[in-house]
Image (spheres, rainbow, N blue to C red):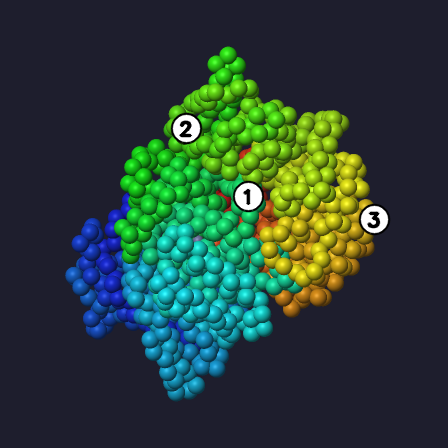
């Protein structure tokens, strides 16, 4: 049920795009930050856009009251206000519009626009938050030069920042002060930012490729400065990497990062003033896990890379979101791959894609990388736009090759610097720079759904000819049927029966629905390594035998496919056990024994071995089954892990002992690999949750000198009913109660438990004095951890898991609609689940839909889920 709402849900279509009626070349903003209210004065010089199709100036504005309006200095009342828009009919060719309005950042719990986080004023304008600050043409194709004056109490808000360079500052009567910032580069209003607070600064510098010195400042709350060195090092590496790999130099004199505790997403790339979730800045051995360190490096890189891919060249409209996000994710993935182990990064990225994007692409919310319509753009910051979008860029890189790809990106930056463009423009540069026709490739941007690629092979001994045949298909998705064949790069290598590589990697280009590729001069039947490096985001089905896969698992020269072969064997084994719990899986168990032996012999990369020893996660397995029943998958998984433990206990204990940490803590790929391997082994050794398991995990906890080891130990204890569990969790809480990001882990690790009393546990956590529904990190630490990362209990047949999430969605709808809509994610895929679960998931969605005053955000995802 939807009652009176400020703005009724309205679908926006890509096909309806028209250029803005007015240009806004100069924007002057002045903020008077006062207790309980902020007065915003906006003075904008508007000029009629020759490309515009309307004479009316239409400004977006929400959550503010207008104090006064003037045109060219004269009071003006001839505007109309309706549905969150101010319309001024035919105001003329060129004029200056002044709007004074009042907003209330202290009361802003949606965390869009100007709000406060622990007393610090900060902004989040992407995608449509700027309209909560002042009336504006809130669209990314209107680019303006911003001058921003901030005035506040000097003692409470000594730091006052906006984009660009500091132009002026001074003191005012009554203990107040002001600062004026000027950003010389025209930008859309979604990149505007303001920060005011009592923060401390960590400073460094970077010298660019042309020898210019850039000041680098990270602002955090007092006490957190010791946790900034990893972020600062990551920023400097990012700046250097973008120069080396893309030839991109930073153009301003200053680059600021501000960390805030209350943030809907990870971070935001506002020009020269990035605002970050503290979770993606602060990192110290005692408070951050290896995976946190990796995320900090990746997201610092991501936001920095946006400076060129997003800011200097921006999006024409929000249907082009993947233009900047897909490309920037690809850039951050490659940056992380260059800084660490490439194969490990690729494995983790593909695992994430399969676990989180594949389900989205198979749900009623499936949408293309360049969508055709939306109601609320905030709902489109998705795994499809980001991660699948990155795969599309990666495929273009594969098809063009590194040299032509670089030519194409040079052309893109040259041609479009300072402009707002489309995904089509990007692909056009790929086509022009390489001389290739990319028309068919563009279907990847328009057709939703994860394609299936089926491969079969034939060996003709007489002709010494080997043939690989493929068929591709893409499922129907909402509003889309009859998908056309995609242009697919399939990276393939061939191995001989003794494991030697006889054909090194080559990229086969598939363009038809069914297509064959032949290899001549092949002396004996080879084993193919297909889709090396996961060269296309598809579900691959092959006719490879278990023995073929075992050969690849040992000998493939492609690190990704070596791992993938083992995962496919594991997946087959899980399916066998699901079909018959008594199935003979001794071969699989023996193969894992061989891997453990190799690890004991000190052979190979420890990080890769850790991943090879890990069974696919429930969420990944579900993608390959016709009907998802998490409890059944879990039972099979647990039975296999138990057999592994029983069969290989001594060798696993030896491997665990051989990888104990010695010497000083380090964040190197080797040290992280060693810790990951210990974790994978401990996982198997503690699967039965008996007294020995609890003792072993507690010993791991007690020996820990870093957060990775502590979290590993707690994760192994969380399913336990032994007394060590409570003891370790209590110690952890007491030790870290002053560190909110660590307390988030304390919540998450308990929410992941599969033990019987989990519903009492999460109810208790929800009532815990440290729980705060208004803090997104804390909400994620309980609800996302439970609903996404604990599939067994979330999908408990009692329905209690669904009810727990449903109530939170309804509660958050009134507080933070963006967060509320995001929490619907695990319910969207209801049609894929076992019938008894489906009914209850659907009922939870229907209950949300009947909530009074449902936000557009929640309305869109829930109503589409039920379609
Ligand atoms: N552009 C940001 C990033 O990916 C994300 C901002 C998302 N904001 C939002 N309201 N959904 O780096
Ligand atoms: Zn981004």
Q: Mark 1 touching mark 2, by CB under 8 A?
A: no
Near mark 3 (Cα within 10 A), the count class, few <14, some 14-19 or many ≥20, is: some
- Considering only order in the chain, which callout, 2 or 3, is on the residue closer to the N terminus? 2
User: Are there few (<14), some (14-19), or many (20+) residues within 10 Å of tag 2?
Assistant: some
- Residue sitting nearer the eye, 78 or 571: 571
Pinpoint residue 96: horizontal percent, then vertical percent.
Answer: 22, 68
Single out the mark in the foreground, 1 or 2: 1
- Percent position (x, y) of residue 153? 44, 80
Q: SS for tag 2?
A: strand
Q: Quadrant of residue 627?
A: top right
848 relative to 426 in the view: left or right: right
Give the numbered dot on residue 343: 1
Do residues under tags 3 and 2 come within 8 Å of each other at their CB atoms? no
Compare marks 3 and 1 and give the one earlier in the sequence. Answer: 1
- For disc 2, the marked residue is 510
Viewer-proximal residue among 299 and 521:
521
Circle on res. 691: 3
Q: Is residue 629 left or right of residue 541?
A: right
Distance from Cα at disc 3 to Cα at disc 1: 37 Å
Work out whether 537 lies above or below 90.
Answer: above
Who's the residue at 30% across and 66% down the image? 184
Residue 567 located left or right of residue 705: left
User: What is the count of numbered marks?
Assistant: 3
Circle 1 — which element?
helix
Q: What is the distance, in whole Å, between disc 3 and disc 2 at their CAs?
A: 55 Å
Q: Residue furthest right?
A: 691
User: What is the C-alpha distance between the residues marked 1 and 2?
Assistant: 24 Å
Ligand 2 within 8 Å of the CB at mark 1: no
Neighbours of disc 1 within 10 Å: few (<14), some (14-19), many (20+): some
Along the viewing direction, whichever of 441 and 253 lies nearer the viewer:
253
Which residue: 52% across, 57% down? 297
Horizontal and vertical percent for residue 459?
A: 52, 17
């Amino acid at each position: 049920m939807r009652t009176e709402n400020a703005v009724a849900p309205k679908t926006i279509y890509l096909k309806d795009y028209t250029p803005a009626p007015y240009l806004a070349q100069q924007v002057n903003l002045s903020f008077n930050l006062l207790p309980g209210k902020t007065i915003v004065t906006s003075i904008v010089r508007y000029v009629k856009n020759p490309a515009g199709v309307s004479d009316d100036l239409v400004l977006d504005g929400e959550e503010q009251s207008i104090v006064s309006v003037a045109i060219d200095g004269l009071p003006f009342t001839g505007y109309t206000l309706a549905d969150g828009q101010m319309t001024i009919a035919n105001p003329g060719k060129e004029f200056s519009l002044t709007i004074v309005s009042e907003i209330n950042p202290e009361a802003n719990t949606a965390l869009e626009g100007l709000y406060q986080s622990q007393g610090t004023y900060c902004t989040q304008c992407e995608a449509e938050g700027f309209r909560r600050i002042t009336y504006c043409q809130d669209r990314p194709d209107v680019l303006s030069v911003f001058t921003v004056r901030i005035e506040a109490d000097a003692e409470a808000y000594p730091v006052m920042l906006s984009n660009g360079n500091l132009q002026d500052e001074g003191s005012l009567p009554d203990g107040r002060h002001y600062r004026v910032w000027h950003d010389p580069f025209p930008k859309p209003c979604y990149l505007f930012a303001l920060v005011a607070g009592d923060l401390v600064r960590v400073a460094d510098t970077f010298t660019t490729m042309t020898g210019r010195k850039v000041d680098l400042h990270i602002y955090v709350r007092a006490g957190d400065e010791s946790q900034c060195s990893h972020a600062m090092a990551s920023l400097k590496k990012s700046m250097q990497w973008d120069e080396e790999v893309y030839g991109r130099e930073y153009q301003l004199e200053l680059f600021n990062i501000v960390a805030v505790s209350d943030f809907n997403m990870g971070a935001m790339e506002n020009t020269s003033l990035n605002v970050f979730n503290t979770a993606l800045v602060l990192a110290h051995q005692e408070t951050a896990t290896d995976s946190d360190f990796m995320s900090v490096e990746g997201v610092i890189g991501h936001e920095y890379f946006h400076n060129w891919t997003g800011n200097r060249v921006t999006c024409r409209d929000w249907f082009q979101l993947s233009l900047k996000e897909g490309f920037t994710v690809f850039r951050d993935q490659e940056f992380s791959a260059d800084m660490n182990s490439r194969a490990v990064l690729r494995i983790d990225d593909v695992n994430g894609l399969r676990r989180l994007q594949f389900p989205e692409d198979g749900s009623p919310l499936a949408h293309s990388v360049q969508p055709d319509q939306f109601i609320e753009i905030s709902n489109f910051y998705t795994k499809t736009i980001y991660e699948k979008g990155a795969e599309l860029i990666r495929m273009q890189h594969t098809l063009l090759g590194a040299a032509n790809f670089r030519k194409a990106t040079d052309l893109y930056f040259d041609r479009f610097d300072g402009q707002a463009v489309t995904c089509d423009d990007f692909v056009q540069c790929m086509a022009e720079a390489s001389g290739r026709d990319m028309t068919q490739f563009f279907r990847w941007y328009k057709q939703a759904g994860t394609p299936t690629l089926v491969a079969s092979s034939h060996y003709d001994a007489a002709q010494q000819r080997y043939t690989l045949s493929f068929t591709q298909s893409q499922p129907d998705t909402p509003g889309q049927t009859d998908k056309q064949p995609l242009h697919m790069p399939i990276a393939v290598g061939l191995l001989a029966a003794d494991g030697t590589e006889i054909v090194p990697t080559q990229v086969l280009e598939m363009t038809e629905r069914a297509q064959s590729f032949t290899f001549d001069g092949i002396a004996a039947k080879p084993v193919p390594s297909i889709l090396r490096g996961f060269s296309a985001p598809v579900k691959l089905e092959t006719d490879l035998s278990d023995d073929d896969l075992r050969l690849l698992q040992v000998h493939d020269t492609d690190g990704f496919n070596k791992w993938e072969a083992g995962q496919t064997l594991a997946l087959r084994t899980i399916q066998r056990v699901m079909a018959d719990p008594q199935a003979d899986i001794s071969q699989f168990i023996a193969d894992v024994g061989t891997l453990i032996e190799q690890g004991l012999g000190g052979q190979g990369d420890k990080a890769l071995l850790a991943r090879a020893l890990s069974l696919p996660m429930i969420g990944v397995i579900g993608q390959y089954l016709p009907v998802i029943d998490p409890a059944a998958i879990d039972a099979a998984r647990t039975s296999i892990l138990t057999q592994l433990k029983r069969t290989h206990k001594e060798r696993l204990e030896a491997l665990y002992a051989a990888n104990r940490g010695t010497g000083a803590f380090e964040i190197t790929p080797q040290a992280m690999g060693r810790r990951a391997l210990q974790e994978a082994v401990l996982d198997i050794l503690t699967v039965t949750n008996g007294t020995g398991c609890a003792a072993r995990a507690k010993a791991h906890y007690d020996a820990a000198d870093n957060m990775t080891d502590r979290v590993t130990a707690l994760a192994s204890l969380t399913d336990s009913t032994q007394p060590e569990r409570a003891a370790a969790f209590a110690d952890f809480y007491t030790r870290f109660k002053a560190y909110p990001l660590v307390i988030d882990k304390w919540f998450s690790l308990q929410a992941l438990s599969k033990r019987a009393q989990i519903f009492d546990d999460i109810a208790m956590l929800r009532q815990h004095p440290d729980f705060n529904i208004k803090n997104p990190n804390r909400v994620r630490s309980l609800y996302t951890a439970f609903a996404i990362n604990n599939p067994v209990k979330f999908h408990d047949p009692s329905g209690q898991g669904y009810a727990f999430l449903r109530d939170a969605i309804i509660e958050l709808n009134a507080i933070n609609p963006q967060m509320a809509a995001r929490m619907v994610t695990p319910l969207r895929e209801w049609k894929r689940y076992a019938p008894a679960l489906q009914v209850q998931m659907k009922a939870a969605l229907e209950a949300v839909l009947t909530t009074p005053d449902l936000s557009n955000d929640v309305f869109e995802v829930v109503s589409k889920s039920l379609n």
